[in-house]
Amino acid sequence: MSAFEFAPPQFTENDVQELLSAKYGIKGDLRALESERDQNFAVSSDKGRFVFKIANLGEDVDFLELQNNSLTFLQNSGFEGCPAVVPTTTGENMFVAQKGEQEYHIRMLTFLEGDLYSQKPVSLDRLANLGRFMGKFSKSMSGFFDAAAHRPDFIWNLDNALAAEEYFPSIANPAHRERAEHLCAHYRAETAPKLQHLRMAVIHQDANDNNLVIDPADESKVTGLIDFGDMCYGRQINELAVTMAYALMDQDDLFAASKALVSNYCAEFPLFAEELDVLFDLIRMRLTVSVAMSSHQIKAHPENEYLLVSQKPALELLDRLDDVDPRFMTALFRHAAGLDAVDHASHIINFLEQNQPNTASLFKPDFKYEARFIIPADGSDTTIPPFSDQAFNAWFDEKCAKEEARFGIGRYGEDRTVYQTDAFASKLSKERRTIHMGVDVFVHADEPLHAPMAGEVYAVHDNAFELDYGPTLILKHETDKGVPFYSLYGHLSRSIFDLHHVGDKIEKGQLIGHIGDWDVNGGWYPHLHFQIMTSMLSQSTNFNGVAHRSMWDVWQQICPNPNLLMNQAPQTFEIDEQTPDKLMQRRANLLGPSLSVSYKKKLKMVSGKGVHLYDHAGRAFVDGVNNITHIGHCHPHLVEAISRQAGILNTNTRYLSELVLDYAERITSKMPDQLSVAYFVNSGTEANELALRIARQATGQKDTIVLDWAYHGNSQGTVDVSPYKFKRKGGFPQPDFTHIAEFPDPFRGPYRYGDNDAGAKYAEDVKRRIEEIKSKTGNGAAAFIAESISGVGGQVAYPEGYFKAVYEAVRAEGGVCIADEVQCGFGRVGEHFWAYELQDVVPDIVVMGKPIGNGHPLAAVVTTKELADKFNTGMEYFNSFGGNPVSMAVGMAVMDVIENEGLQAHAKELGNYILGRWHEIKDKYDLVGDVRGHGLFLGMELVEDEQLTPATEKAGAIVNAMRERSILLSTDGPLDNVLKFKPPMVFSRENADFMCDQLDEVISTFS
């Protein structure tokens, strides 16, 4: 017979006093303690405080020995939170006493000082401490076993929970009884099969608030655990399940309480995912058993009020737990235990991060190129009407007009003030759900929507409740390992019901729906609610779009940032208070006024990657003009090289370093053998200054021949040889040592395309300049300096044979030939690594800048040993920063990328393709007079008529129109009528088609 079938013992205080004296030699004050089955007394004596325990007649003696053995084991393991067994004066841990005709087994334990857990209000800190205390208990019990703990039929053994079904008829309330039956059915079908392979242990299994002791000096601290009468050998996870079943009763915030208990328990005693996956079901089953047993036992023992102690709070807790998604609670437990909230969540998120660049745009044309603005819903802007208020219509239209944008953005992770209805409340917590788990994209109704990646239709459903999603589409996707995840599209139009059925396959980029209007989308301004789910939890056709703030860390693993599929720049979701207008005002006060700013509508760029620049609103722009970022913005190999070397050493070239020598060897290896000596500086201007110094020192002359409209730098020395500067607005008279040769322009000059002798004819003017110098000085020019392809001259490639004839004439009179490769070197022209090779010449000095460091301040001069020796006059040439280790690491990294990614060959192939597209445009529009260039150094000259009247205003207007289409170009040439195209070398065929298509459309509006 079990202890439940015998009445508790009925010893009097006199009986107990006699036994205390006879067996322990103790006399003291007694206080009866509440107990369900046994009879217990607190004993206060001069020898200490104890608990005198008289076992129920139905208790198995071996089980009583088990309790003693476990307490001794805990003492020996160093666990101080349990009572110790007190031996009798004859050394017995237990003895037998007669009462009437019955013999009772009696023990005595030390009394744990403190208050009962039930006597003080429970704080979150105490729950955390309880979790840690029970975790320590489980850890301390590890390795303990006693055969008497094997109690498979014990009604309070949670592994035997289904045995409580026979008591369900005693549950008076039909709804409560029906719930108990439902939970048992679920347990039998879903939970029990999962238990088979879980860890077993000897567990206490009754950490209720009357069996726990707290520190009277610190109510948050749990110091003891008593009453080992429910011990058994069962699943290890049952210990925490029982603890939580009691601890969660009467808690205001079940989420926070659960998190505190599980995280602290697992901090001391880690649990496996398989154990956490059944924890919520086990908590509910323990509560169900409690309700069933209390309902049954009160009929047999109506005088024992202890039986009803936990029934009411147990029922209330079960009611509240009915209001939560069970799988969310499992996610909460897993996360609190330090695991992924959802199985494989980390893998899914990592897959999405790696796959992000391969996603398709939700909207066409590509959404990343669309202007956008943030619509804060956090209460920071009180002028914005609620999204469910018709007044939002006018506000949105006005905002779109002001920002020249079609799209508004509602942010992921935003703590919103708009969720005030009961739909966002919960029985589990007084805290409302306010954290937005999706991204909202506001746009006018009927805007088409496309799938960001392939998948299949998981659900297509009308959630037709006020302020719900309305027509909702959920797609199921898979990672590269076949792990499923989901994307949700809410507030759509009813077109989805014609487009889709559950199970339909969806291709990346496929039309999947349209934005719904007010009357169908749940009662909101037209917008998309877009969300990712690593698990559907227990949902099928809907999913929470808003989370509790306190649970946000859990929800972030269930609903990661939707931008993983949107692939928008982070600035899309950040409000930037320093707008372009504000920066222009600050700039006017702080920076020199001679510095211009591109485009009529100014751009504030905040980041870059590859061929893209991103403005303060996260809008992407295709960079077609920044040839400095040769290998693309923020190339990871370059970023790593800078960071690594900056963390090791950066100093000057007066110390020995392999880096500067290695880089000098690498640069000179790309040139003819005679070009073997390198100097390193910080800019193209410095490099051209140095090249001129070398030439002038070597020749003893200063007179320099330059091309008309040439530009070689911003210092006085280089502006002196830059007609592009001194001949224009704000310029100055031509220096007497600067001699301007005719610009060899085969489109606009006197000798044009089709003239096979044009190169030689243009070279004649250089010869005339030499004669001019000789007539003045008696000597030839110190140097001839020219860009190998003219940039500021209008992206002009010189006629064949031009440099050959010029170099021959200059050298014949002792002059030095300088090739300015600042803009056009490093494989940009495609056919060759250096643009001077297009002319089949070898310069005496080569100047490099801009692309050499991909934006890092680095430039170089390479010359012959003969010229270097002549420059070595005894006056040291030292540059504080030139050749520093960080700059050399940068240079090496740039060369790595050029070579490893085949950028020179790519420039040739893509450049030919773009020129072909441009020729098609030229054939369509008279506005296009010429297209020219090599590789990714191209120009399109615009003219008004056959007389080649420059279309300067139209060129500027086209550049600004292209900017509005997210493509960055600029104008160049002496007449500012040439569209220049010198993009990062990683420009792709897709980028090229986008640019050419948009340019075609824009030019058509001006022709």
Image (cartoon, rainbow, N blue to C red):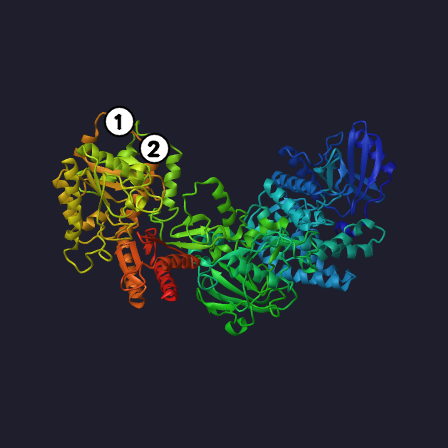
Helix, strand or loop at disc 1? loop
Q: Which residue is mark 1?
A: 876
Going by the image, does 656 lie left or right of 118? left
Going by the image, does 325 lie left or right of 528? right
The location of residue 509, given as percent across then percent down, is 44, 65
Figure quadrant of the C terminus:
bottom left
Label 2 CA crowd tier, 10 Å (few <14, some 14–19, many 20+):
some
Disc 1 marks a residue whose amino acid type is Glu
| Residue 932 appears in the figure | yes
Q: Nearer the viewer, mark 1 or mark 2?
A: 1
Q: Which residue is mark 2?
A: 881
Going by the image, does 222 lie left or right of 10? left
Going by the image, does 885 lie left or right of 433? left
Residue with the most extreme bottom position: 498
| Residue 150 appears in the figure | no
The location of residue 403, given as percent across then percent down, is 52, 57
Helix, strand or loop at disc 2? loop
Q: Quadrant of residue 208?
A: top right
Instruction: Give yes or no for contact between labels 1 and 2 (Cβ–Cβ under 8 Å).
Output: no
Disc 2 marks a residue whose amino acid type is Phe
Q: CA distance from mark 1 to mark 2?
A: 15 Å
Depth order, front residue of 656/207: 656
The location of residue 650, given as percent across then percent down, is 36, 32
Which residue appears at 61% of the width and 47% of the height? 236
Which residue appears at 57% of the width and 68% of the height? 516
